């Protein structure tokens, strides 16, 4: 009974935390590809190779369903994986669709043609690889018309958060929001399209102003997973143990993860 959660590193722990709270009876196997993080500056082929290797390891740990908590992997590799790589008895899902369903106020499985929605001007904050994939705009176009998306690639923010340098992370977020506002002065919604940005949500909200609705993923992904498992309970795989796997140094990664989540986390070598 296990579900896999994949991320390039530690950022996906924001998603792990939310899904564990929402589904306390489900064991989760977390895989952090810390040896190869960050993904946000890699090209799409590279992200595809690394993500498929990690997902295979999660299948090996008894997870038939894997959630790509990493936005960069969801944006740059997921469609290719679903089209030509994932076998019929397994599932790999990403983090963009739940977010876009929330943004466009659609229920799961609503495949009606794209329609006009309340939001008109959306700011997307994400890594350089996610921005250049244009996956967010593509998924949005399947569901909504007339929405103007301005994407801001937020170089440096992930590294500053990983280094624990909150002052630098805050300064970078404010400068990326300023840059976005020069291109789109009045967004009505903003999407935090990277695992790490929920940790800076207060700064994004402050810099954007109270009238901008900020969409952050962890909670939306948890709700969407709970809904999915209600409909497809057979997708909870045979694994029975919660585990934390890393391609990095388990001791170092465990210490950082413990700081990140403010509870003791013990990683083992993937
Ligand atoms: N996990 C990545 C994401 O959500 C951010 C970190 C990275 O660049 O690897 O896009």
Image (cartoon, rainbow, N blue to C red):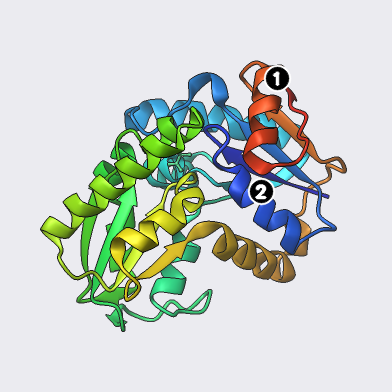
Give 207 or 135, whichever is nearer the viewer.
207
Q: Which residue is mark 2?
A: 16
> Do the numbered discs 1 and 2 sit on residues whose CB atoms are within 8 Å?
no
Residue 91: in sight, yes or no?
no
Residue at the top extreme, as displayed: 249
93 lies above or below 243: below
Task: Answer left or right for 200 relative to 137.
Answer: right
Q: Residue 208 location in percent, x, y?
A: 30, 63
Residue 44: in sight, yes or no?
yes
Q: Residue at x 12, y 57 (%)?
A: 183
Give the class, few, some or many, for how many residues have Cα within 10 Å of label 2's Cα (few <14, many ≥20): many
Confirm or reject: label 1 Cβ below 8 Å from ligand 1. no
Q: Residue 126 location in percent, x, y?
A: 34, 47
22 lies above or below 7: below
Q: Quadrant of ligand 1?
A: top left
Residue 246 found in image quarter: top right
Task: Answer left or right for 112 relative to 132.
Answer: right
> How far apart are the alpha carbons under marks 1 and 2?
18 Å
Q: Residue at x 73, y 33 (%)?
A: 244
Q: Residue at x 70, y 71 (%)?
A: 231
Q: Residue at x 45, y 38 (%)?
A: 166
Q: What label does residue 173 carry, if any?
A: none
Residue at the left extreme, as displayed: 182
Task: Answer left or right for 252 relative to 145.
Answer: right
Q: Secondary structure at mark 1?
A: helix
Residue 122 found in image quarter: bottom left
Q: Secondary structure at mark 2?
A: helix
Q: Residue 133 location in percent, x, y?
A: 28, 44
Give 214 or 106, whichever is nearer the viewer.
214
Q: Residue 182 location in percent, x, y?
A: 12, 57
Q: Which residue is mark 1?
A: 250
């Amino acid at each position: 009974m296990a579900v896999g959660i994949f991320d390039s590193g530690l950022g996906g722990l924001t998603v792990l935390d939310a899904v564990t709270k929402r589904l306390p009876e489900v064991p989760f196997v977390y895989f952090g590809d810390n040896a190869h993080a960050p993904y946000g500056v890699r090209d799409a082929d590279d992200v595809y190779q690394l993500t498929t290797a990690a997902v295979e390891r999660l299948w090996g740990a008894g997870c038939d369903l894997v959630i790509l908590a990493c936005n960069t992997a969801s944006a740059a590799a997921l469609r290719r994986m679903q089209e030509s790589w994932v076998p019929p008895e397994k599932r790999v899902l990403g983090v963009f669709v739940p977010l876009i369903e929330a943004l466009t106020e659609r229920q799961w499985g609503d495949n009606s043609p794209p329609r006009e929605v309340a939001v008109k001007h959306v700011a997307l904050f994400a890594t350089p690889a996610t921005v250049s994939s244009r996956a967010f705009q593509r998924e949005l176009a399947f569901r909504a018309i007339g929405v103007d998306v301005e994407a801001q690639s937020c170089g440096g923010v992930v590294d500053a958060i990983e280094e624990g340098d909150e002052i630098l992370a805050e300064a970078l977020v404010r400068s990326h929001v300023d840059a976005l506002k020069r291109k789109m002065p009045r967004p009505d919604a903003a999407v935090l399209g990277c695992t790490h940005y929920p940790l800076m949500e207060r700064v994004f909200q402050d810099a954007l102003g109270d009238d901008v609705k900020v969409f952050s993923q962890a909670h939306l992904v948890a709700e969407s997973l709970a809904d999915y498992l209600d409909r497809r309970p057979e997708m909870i795989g045979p694994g029975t143990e919660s585990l934390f796997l890393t391609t990095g140094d388990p001791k170092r990664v465990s210490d950082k993860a413990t700081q990140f989540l403010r509870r003791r986390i013990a990683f083992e070598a993937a």
